[in-house]
């Protein structure tokens, strides 16, 4: 047995293999189930017990050598000589590698920004950790207004003057303080509210605020701007409707509905059979707010609006539960690949 192993070791050393065919012959002769090395394993039972450890080791070394030789030759041939084997198969289906996509909230935020950019609104940003003045006082919130309540607002380290902004309207105040009209700006950003998380509410979400201040800005300008936005966002056939509402920082104030883009206004379960979907709040900037921010309210008027990005995304893509946007389940996110 030992001499057979030695003999085969020697053969491995002398062997000359130049073609793929020769390599295959080698594989069959030495490494296949019916090959010479396998035959040694079969003979192994006849080896006297005391020699088994030594002989077993020699057979294993032989087998590894043969296998390594085969592997090396195969790699080399694959790289160079065997052009025949390596021919490209141009009919083979393409393997697409998976590429990431924008998050649906980023997509919708970008779409909102693009729509307003096209009519001259520029982006402004403000801090997420904000003071009471810019979140509430400048915006005409009375001292006892419930939105200032500990229940709704996250305060920073028990200082009642510093909080996480509850809306992006705070950026309005900052812009008006530091710029002179004409002002035409939108402010996208994250906002924070102490809300229980549910299918319709979250403690962190995104808003886009809009502000236009100039001489003779009218409610008609506001309505036309929002109609343009609704058509761009939800389709040319979209209609809007304004309902009277109340916000401390606008007078008059309104809530805006768009005609349901699912049923075309006929009524369905998405619009709860009303034909309308609420998308944002708006109004004419209250003269007190202009004054608080250093703008002459006798000379200038303005309109403002604010919308939730998650809400617009839910309506646009018919997402029934807001929490999907935060869970980052790949099966959900994959549905938006290539959507923008
Ligand atoms: N800040 C309001 C909110 O968070 C949204 C809003 C309503 C913004 C009316 C406005 C506006 O600028 O005019 O619910």
Image (cartoon, rainbow, N blue to C red):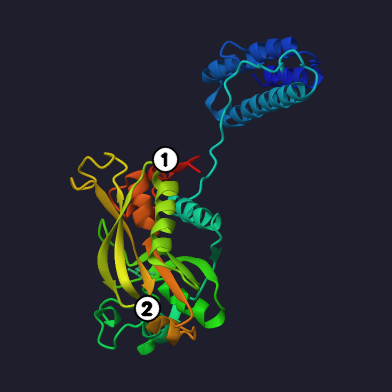
Identify residue for label 1.
Answer: 335
Image coords of residue 73 (percent x, y): 74, 23
Seen at 55% across and 81% down, the residue is 178
Image coords of residue 28 (percent x, y): 64, 11
Q: Count every numbered label the image shows and give the total.
A: 2
Label 1, secondary structure: give it. Answer: helix
Image coords of residue 122 (percent x, y): 56, 64
Contact? badges 1 and 2 (CB < 8 Å):
no
- Mark 1 or 2, nearer chain start: 2
Q: In the rendered view, would you say 339 is above or below 224?
A: above
Q: 143 or 50, which lies in front?
A: 143
Asked if one can make out residue 196 in the rendered structure from this viewpoint, the answer is: no
Seen at 24% across and 80% down, the residue is 146
Asked if residue 174 lies left or right of residue 191, the reply is right
Seen at 52% across and 76% down, the residue is 175
Label 2, secondary structure: give it. Answer: loop
Quarter of the image where the N terminus is located: top right
Q: In the rendered view, would you say 86 is above or below 304?
A: above
Image coords of residue 182 (percent x, y): 55, 72
Dot 2: within a 10 Å radius of its alpha carbon, few (fewer than 14), some, or many (20 or more) residues?
many
Name the image quarter holding residue 144. Answer: bottom left
Work out how far the residue at label 1 is from the one at label 2, CA to CA, in angstroms.
42 Å
**Mark 1 or 2: the one toward you:** 2
Q: State which image quarter holds ligand 1.
A: bottom left
Seen at 26% across and 39% down, the residue is 263
Dot 1: within a 10 Å radius of its alpha carbon, few (fewer than 14), some, or many (20 or more) residues?
few
Is label 2's Cβ within 8 Å of ligand 1?
no
Identify residue for label 2.
Answer: 286
Asked if one can make out residue 148 in the rendered structure from this viewpoint, the answer is: yes
């Amino acid at each position: 047995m030992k001499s057979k192993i030695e003999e085969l070791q020697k053969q491995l050393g002398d062997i000359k293999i130049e073609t793929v065919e020769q390599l295959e012959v080698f594989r069959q002769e030495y490494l296949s189930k019916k090959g010479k090395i396998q035959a040694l394993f079969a003979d192994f039972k006849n080896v006297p017990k005391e020699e088994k450890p030594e002989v077993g080791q020699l057979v294993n070394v032989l087998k590894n050598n043969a296998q390594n030789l085969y592997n090396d030759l195969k790699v080399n041939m694959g790289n160079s000589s065997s052009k025949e084997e390596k021919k490209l198969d141009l009919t083979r289906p393409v393997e697409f590698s998976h590429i990431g996509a924008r998050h649906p909230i980023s997509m919708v935020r970008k779409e909102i920004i693009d729509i307003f950019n096209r009519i001259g609104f520029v982006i402004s940003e403000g801090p997420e950790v904000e003071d009471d003045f810019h979140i509430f006082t400048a915006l005409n919130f009375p001292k006892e207004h419930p939105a200032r309540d500990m229940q709704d607002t996250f305060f920073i380290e028990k200082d009642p003057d510093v909080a996480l902004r509850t809306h992006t309207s705070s950026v309005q105040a900052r812009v008006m303080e530091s710029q002179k009209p004409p002002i035409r700006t939108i402010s996208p950003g994250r906002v924070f509210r102490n809300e229980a998380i549910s299918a319709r509410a979250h403690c962190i979400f995104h808003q886009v605020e809009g502000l236009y201040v100039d001489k003779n800005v009218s409610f008609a300008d506001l309505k036309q701007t929002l109609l343009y936005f609704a058509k761009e966002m939800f389709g040319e056939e979209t209609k809007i409707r304004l309902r009277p509402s109340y916000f401390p920082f606008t007078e008059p104030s309104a809530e805006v509905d768009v005609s349901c883009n699912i049923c075309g206004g006929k009524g369905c379960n998405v619009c709860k059979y009303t034909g309308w979907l609420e998308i944002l709040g708006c109004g004419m900037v209250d003269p007190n707010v202009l004054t608080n921010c250093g703008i002459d309210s006798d000379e200038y008027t303005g309109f403002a609006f604010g919308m939730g990005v998650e809400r617009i995304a839910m309506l646009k893509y018919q997402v029934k539960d807001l929490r999907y946007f935060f869970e980052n389940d790949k099966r959900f996110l994959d549905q938006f690949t290539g959507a923008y």
